[in-house]
Structure formats: structure tokens, C-alpha cells
Image (spheres, helix red, strand yellow):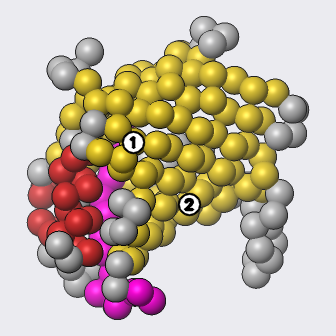
């Protein structure tokens, strides 16, 4: 299967309802927190994807219908009882430029609403078809978030989240603010 076909298959497997158990390590305050999330991933129509493109003033030579797009809703409860409900529309736009290796695919990851900052945002993604890993890097104002989803099988994913304190331009990522790990299992139907 080609890298592009594996990429589309990865996203087909992501559609549905998921249950997630996560652990977050807050480095600056040396604390650990657990949370439970139920979330749903639903395909976007081409019209909804077009709105995500418009919200980001994003133009691409790619046809919108060839870009995977999703509506993500989630309900999170922390072990302290804090509740977060959020939804976001997003799309992945593969680059037309060849990647460094034929098993990699890179491009832009665009959202109508960012997680750390409530605004549209354009991020970068890299998909490794050998590992079935999607790596997303978002440069926020104060944080650089490096989020990984590895599809173990169509019903299980492993999540890693590294939030770095944003370094000065041109400097490497070095100082972690948060590290998160999660196991996500597919549910039927959406709770």
C-alpha cells in the first residue's frame, strides 16, 4: 500500500467514538494528573473543510476533497473533577513536495480552533506509514506542542504529548512544560 493510501486508511480508522485514559506530567510544578476523555471523530463535508480553510486564510493547490477533515468533540474529566468540553474542525493538507523518505508524508494541519489558544491555527504534520504514526507540531505563542498518535490497530491508539516552552526563533526545543501519555480505545456507539 502506498504512503498516501496508508495515510487515508489511518484517518478512516480514526472515525468513530473513543475512550481515552491519559496521564499528564506537569514539569514546572512537579505534579502528575490523570484524566478520562470520551471523544468522537466525525468526517467533515467539503463545505465544512472549505470553512476551515477560509478561517485560516489558507490556500492550497490540493483539492479540498483529497484532504482528510474531521469534526472532533470531546468531554474530559480530570481526577480532580475538572470538566472540559470542546469541539474543533480540522483538516490535513498533504504537501505536493516529496518527503525525505518514501514512507513519510508531510503537510499542514489546520484547525478552526486551537487547543492552547482559542483561534484558527496552521500547524505542521508528518505521517510515518511504516509506524502508522501521525506527528503534529503546533507553535503557539508560549508553547510548542508536539503531539503523536500511533495507530496500533483499528481499535487502539497510543497518544504522546510533549509541550515545550517556546524557545527563541532558531533555537532547538529543549525545556519541557508538560508530558502526556494516553491509551485510546474505540467504542461503539458514541456515549
Q: Give residue 11's position: percent from left, percent from top.
A: 24, 53
* Residue 170 as seen in the image, left or right of residue 83: right
- Say whether residue 86 is magenta: yes
Q: Residue at x 55, y 62 (%)?
A: 137
The magenta segment: 84-101
* Residue at left offset 17%, top offset 72%: 1
Q: Is residue 127 left or right of residue 118?
A: left
Question: Can residue 108 be seen?
Answer: no
Q: Is residue 138 above or below residue 113?
A: below
Q: Percent x, y for residue 46?
A: 12, 58
Q: Residue at x 35, y 78 (%)?
A: 103
- Residue that mark 2 sits on: 138
Q: Residue tagged by mark 1?
A: 157
Q: Secondary structure at mark 2?
A: strand
Give the mark nearer the N terminus: 2 vs 1: 2
Instruction: Look at the image and tell me whether residue 162 can be seen.
Output: yes
Between 19 and 55, which is closer to the camera in this rendering?
19
Amino acid at each position: 500500500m502506498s504512503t498516501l493510501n496508508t495515510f487515508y486508511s489511518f484517518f478512516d480508522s480514526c472515525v468513530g467514538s473513543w475512550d481515552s485514559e491519559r496521564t499528564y506530567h506537569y514539569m514546572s510544578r512537579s505534579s502528575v494528573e490523570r484524566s478520562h476523555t470520551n471523544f468522537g471523530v466525525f468526517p467533515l463535508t467539503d463545505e465544512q473543510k472549505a470553512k476551515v480553510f477560509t478561517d485560516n486564510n489558507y490556500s492550497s493547490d490540493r483539492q479540498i476533497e483529497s484532504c482528510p477533515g474531521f469534526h472532533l468533540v470531546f468531554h474530559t474529566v480530570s481526577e480532580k473533577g475538572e470538566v472540559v468540553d470542546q469541539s474543533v474542525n480540522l483538516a490535513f493538507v498533504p504537501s505536493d513536495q516529496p518527503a525525505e523518505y518514501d514512507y513519510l508524508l508531510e503537510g499542514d494541519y489546520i484547525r478552526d480552533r486551537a487547543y492552547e489558544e482559542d483561534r484558527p491555527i496552521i500547524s505542521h504534520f508528518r505521517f510515518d506509514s511504516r509506524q502508522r504514526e501521525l506527528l503534529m507540531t503546533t507553535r503557539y505563542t508560549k508553547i510548542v506542542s508536539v503531539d503523536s498518535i500511533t495507530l496500533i490497530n483499528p481499535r487502539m491508539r497510543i497518544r504522546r504529548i510533549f509541550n515545550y516552552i517556546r524557545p527563541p526563533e532558531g533555537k532547538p526545543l529543549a525545556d519541557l512544560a508538560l508530558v502526556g501519555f494516553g491509551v485510546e480505545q474505540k467504542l461503539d456507539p458514541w456515549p
